[in-house]
Amino acid sequence: MRDIKLPFCPGCGCLTVISRFLRAVHELGHKDLSKFVFCSGIGCAAWIPSPHFKADSIHTAHGRSIPVATGIKLMRPDLNVVVFGGDGDLAGIGLSHLVHAARRNLDIAVFMVNNMIYGMTGGQVAPTTPLGTKTTTTPYGSFEHPLDVPSLLVTAGASYAARWTTAHGEQLKEAMKKALATRGFAFVEAVSPCPTAFGRRAGFKDVAEIVRWFRESSVPLEEAEKMTAEDLTKKIVVGEFVYRKISTFTEALYRTIREAEKSAETK
Amino acid sequence: MTGKTSATHFWQGNEACAEATIAAGCRFFAGYPITPASEIFEHLARRLPQAGGITIQMEDEIASIGAVIGASWAGAKAMTATSGPGFSLMQELIGYAFMTETPCVVVDVQRAGPSTGQATKAGQGDVMQARWGTHGDYTSIALSPNSVQEMFDLTIRAFNLAETYRTPVVLLADEVVAHMREQAVIPPSNQIKITNRKKPKPTDKAFFNGEDIAPMPSVGEGYNVPVTGSTHNEHGYRFTADRTVHEKLVKNLIRKIRDNAGKIVDYESLNVDDCDVGVVSFGCTSRAIHETIELAKKKGLTVGSVRLKTIWPFPEEAVRNMAKNVKVIVVPELNMREMFYEVERVVHGAVPVVPLNKIGGGEMITPEELLAEIARSVKKVD
């Protein structure tokens, strides 16, 4: 980390995500972040790496971290390319890039900090906001269903997808380790408290109450499979959604380039 | 294909552009299908991997320019090619490339717009979009080829300018120049001038926002560079509210182009010292000028021409000088007046400036039509 003041509000889940991520990197045996490149978009979570990590970090436009990460990874397959972003950034404006990166099984790790709100802009409804939640743009309560991002990415073709909350520090760290070690597209959603822009209007007294809600409403994937869709609307399904070994994008691409180079030589 | 000896080809414009991309040292192309630019991607998809390079079809044009920017920060010369609708989508990240001083080339093969317009028909309606398409303050470089030969030559130059000035460069082509076939003479590869970005020394710490163009590190080289589209200082650190940092950054972005405009500007003059009427033209429209001059001679009219090879920065001196010798200037273009206003601004009332506009159906302004407008304009001022 660089010795500069972090911008996050007291109680922000980004702080937990930073500590879990750095612990995961350390436990994987990295002494520093010199083999990493970080990409992020716009929003609170985008400021996790940029410029706070002592590493190369590309802080892109809103929703566009994954395209930029794609260009970097294709040119430098030897580097660990890691994307940090919020739910608005990755599952709202940048959703198509997220789905296509999973479809390609692009070898990057994506960490989505889901605070269920647009925090930086002052608390507007997000694609992940629970039905009925009061936000600045849904003052009478949200009337949209939230998106289940890990399930979507399983369908799209990700190698690894998981969801935990910041109340599950150990599991979150282990999921991040597994994501970083996965060959192919790896995704971890960290459901995260935003006391400032979400909790206040959604009726939570303080951050402790949000974290208690995370803990009490979390349901392991195996149990969730036995529950009805209606029962699940008030729950947070946690666990590992998929882990599979399938050919990755950079492997396939570089194989193609080698063949093309060879065919040009023999001509 | 470029080799040790010069070669003559019968190429399509888009094919010449693609071959120049390889000759310029570009090794990354990301794109999305669009008429009339797709042949650039298709040709590169076959040829670039043979040279060890990468082509990828992204999910849209936003992602295409995003991948190009990522590849550029990973050390590659990188390009995308599109047409109006895709160029509109790319504007967001073209702005990011200006702000982060990311070298890259964007080819816009213009077609008739706005919106979907006429996808297969030529237009020149993106002149101002190439200058000020994205929001905020900056200044841009845009080149305008008018032949297959120039689709090659100016593509090379676009990369060189992007690398020299650390900025996105637009190759503003059009459907006619992109799709026609004609001869292109390609010099031996060792005679093609190639410029590469300035790299930092290990002790360097300032990679942005310099009085001179700062050296550009790549990711993975150990510089731990923070890159951001937010206002930043020379080290890349965000300053989201400081007035002076913002002013310095934006003024430097503009200055590095404006102060070097003399080196960037390129045009071709014909007959300008001895003529009654001047024509300022660019791209496919400028192909009518030679015949127009000949036809005019037969009518006793002397016509001079300034053909713009860079449209931005605008060749102000050349146009201003021509205005000293002529009675009137005619500006033919396949749009509803874009370059006309720039010529009028530069001429500043010295002589009348007359627009000649034609749009739709991909129809060109013919030498006869241009001549008729010239004759009409001369009559009016005489």
Image (cartoon, coloured by chain):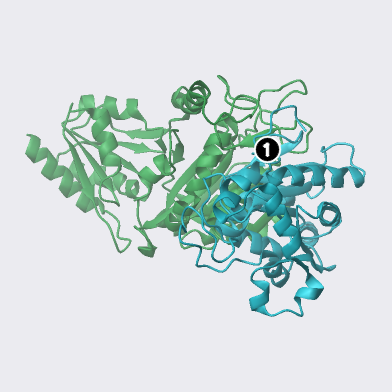
Q: How many marks?
A: 1
Image point (56%, 44%), residue name: A120
Colour chain B appears in: green
Image point (71%, 42%), residue name: B74
* Amino acid tagged 1: Ser
Colour chain A appears in: cyan
In this rendering, position of residue A38 left or right of residue B186: right
Image point (46%, 61%), residue name: A140
Q: Is residue B164 above or below residue B125?
A: above
* Residue B248 visible to the viewer: yes
Q: Is residue A43 above or below residue A129?
A: above
The quarter holding residue A46 reads: top right
Q: Position of residue B281 (x, y in %)?
A: 31, 42
In this rendering, position of residue B310 left or right of residue B162: left
Query: In this orientation, which residue lies closer to the viewer: B58 or A209?
Result: A209
Query: In this orientation, which residue lies closer to the viewer: A60 or A130?
Result: A130
